[in-house]
Amino acid sequence: MTPQQRLLFGGESAPWEEDDRELRSVAQVVFSEAPYGPYDYAVPEPLRGRVQAGKRVFVPLGRGNRRRTGYCISVQSGVASSRRLKNVLKVVDEATLWTPSLLRLAQWLADYYLCPLGQVLETIVPSGVRGAAGTRMKTLLSVPDAVLARMAELRLPPKQRHVLEYLAHCTDGLTAQEIADRCGCSVAPVQGLFKKGLLEATERRVSVFVPEVKGAAEHAVHALTDAQQSAVDAIVAAIRGSCSRSFLLHGVTGSGKTEVYIRAIEEVERHGRQAIVLVPEISLTPQTWQRFQARFARVAVLHSQLTPQERNWHWQRIAAGQVSVVVGARSAVFAPVPQLGLIVIDEEHDPSFKQDTAPRYHARTVAQWRAQQADVPLVLGSATPSLETWQAARRGVIERLGLPRRVAGRTLPEVRVVDLRHEWKGRGALSRVLVTEMHRALDAGGQVILLLNRRGFATYIQCPLCGEVVRCPHCDIPLTHHHHDATAKCHYCDHEESAPTACGACGGTQIRYSGTGTEKLEKQLAACFPGVSCLRMDGDTMRRTGAHEKALERFRRGEVRILLGTQMIAKGLDFPGVTLVGVVNADIGLHFPDFRAAERTFQLVTQVAGRTGRGEAGGRVVVQTFSPDHPAIDAAVRHRYEWFVNHEWESRRRFGYPPASRLVRLVVRGADERATERAAEQLAEAITRQQQGVADVRVVGPAPAPFPKLRGKFRFHLLLLGPKLPVLRRIVSAVRDGIDLGDAVQWTIDVEPQDML
Ligand code: ADP
Ligand code: ZN
């Protein structure tokens, strides 16, 4: 029973107890770990007014009354109830961290993604902000008015008098040390005054963080193309009309999408409102945010490499309305701007917008909700829109704005396909065609980008005598050989062992290291292009903070001629000097057991091809593949987006996969294979029982997940498919609230999953 209901219906007590009942203040509190609540607590008299929704509180929990931090989500005063409630012990936050609108957002998100509210609250306000990083409580001293009035009569030693006279003219409170410094004495006279009761002390939280200020790059302002202008007009009209319309800005690579965002944000700024711009984490480079800094005076940047102090500093400025643009990765969708005016999601198809731990939210879905609540437009930009967004545009739910051509009369690059089935001679990863094209580009003074979406040296290690492949003991995934430290590593869990010289199964010593990763490719390039400076960007070389930034800067300055790397280099980079892009193996990822494998491959090849031909000198692309006829690759090399999505849509419809249906995935994990499988079956039975009589819901599985063992846990999954997400959600939440699979397994709910590992 909620406090309101208790108020209306009089709770569980009998009518004659009416007079004994006191009117109380009751707080609803949730937790980020099980049990999640919400639970009711009484607010004792001294804490009334200070316990508020959106603050953290200390409360006793469970039989042992252990003290836990909870999140207060509402307070009802004047509740008549004689039910015994435990008391709130202490209020943690001085000010509310979760504003009423953030609390509404959190509640919606918890319901949508079937995730405990406490976990959502923790995600929305990052720990640096919760912990007030970069600030300190200080005791500030000042002279009370009563003392000022009788100052002349006081008999004081000279130093104490000097201090008191100084403070009499100070308007702000100062710490004891600050006073001593300014008066040129020790803290002793200050303490003396305090002991005599001539100074009063107040506690205040002050910022002690000094941010590093970086200069913005110069950036030219261009006259818009006609297509850019029409797009800007449509978005500006929605901003002026306070209309929560969603737009798809579908622009080929190099068509000037960012310029459209900037013009729309200028309109938002004129209205005194704020814009949020989301970009994929790896394209959140200085180049990206400097473009915004060059055009707007007050920009905040939020990304994963910020220290807690920096994050809190930005957050406080955002909440105070001191910035007009927030540029950030996924979680910036929660930025607490006071007057939201627009949300932009660049590269909206990028999988990094979905969080892969609870709450498993998609920033696009959250953005849609926020924009709708605030009556402001949402702009989704991409050269390769996701099938979800494309489908919504086709149905007219989203308005499509097209930028079909590159700016300044530039054309899309010409793409040449190398069929590795015929051309590959087993000598390194580069075909003769690609090597020739590279020489041509380099001789003409151009730069080259090579994509190989696999790090490490050799991608698998096998004994040719018995066929044994070296696998991770925890994940059962083949280990990758890393040459520089002679190790074999698991790319999933970071398990690491020394590279074997003999087979663990048969003792054979002819171990073969095959397959090519970026590390091996770098070696081959050094041999093939002696004297040409080459730089590798992947998860191994880019570990250190700022490494990414430095590498791109060297490439921009032309110190590096060949940039090779994983998908890290495929996105968002705008380097006019690049005249050739080579895709070393377009097939990686194509045969993944995931219904989005083709879509992802199409997007990756299109994106990396789009990195060339952005300058005067034009550009070319070479794509090496074993499957030149695969629709994803064929469509990418011919720049045929419409054809590809139509083809892909047909196959999704045929198999009933999103966006032709809605999907919820359940994963059961456990250390014991049999017990995990049994738990998955038990879950499936409960789902099937719950689903009886509900039309149009399909349950697939349980089956071993595509990665059946990760980090030492066996994994089984179960898919629920149907036309209506609320129906799927209702079934799953009913089962969740009524089932206990025991302690030997864990299970997770992924609403609208983006990958199926
Ligand atoms: P996209 O995001 O669509 O790939 P960008 O926004 O990065 O494209 O723009 C590509 C380049 O074109 C940038 O260097 C940008 O400054 C430039 N640009 C944008 N609009 C125009 C325009 N109207 N005329 C000339 N150059 C432009
Ligand atoms: Zn592993």
Image: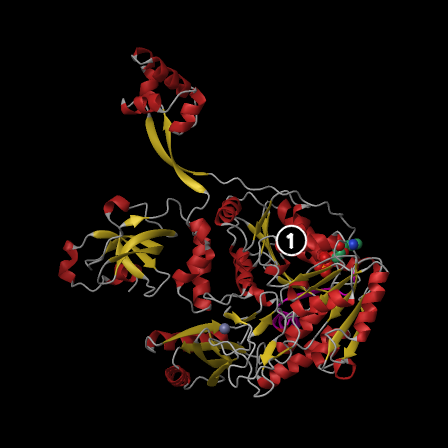
Q: Residue furthest bottom?
A: 466
Q: Is 312 above or below relative to 504? A: above
Residue displayed at 28% across by 24% down: 195
- Magenta range is 388-406
Task: Let me know if residue 288 appears in the view.
Answer: no
Q: Viewer-proximal residue, 380 or 614?
A: 614
Q: Is residue 334 left or right of residue 640?
A: left
Q: Secondary structure at mark 1?
A: helix
Q: Is residue 121 magenta?
A: no
Q: Position of residue 473 (x, y in %)?
A: 47, 77
Q: Is 235 above or below relative to 173? A: below
Q: Viewer-proximal residue, 220 or 711?
A: 711
Q: Viewer-proximal residue, 7 or 678?
A: 678
Q: Which residue is mark 1?
A: 549
Q: Is 681 above or below relative to 757? A: below
Q: Position of residue 648 (x, y in %)?
A: 66, 79
Residue type, label 1: Glu
Task: Let me know if residue 499 appears in the view.
Answer: yes
Q: Could you say which quadrant of the image residue 489 lies in?
A: bottom right
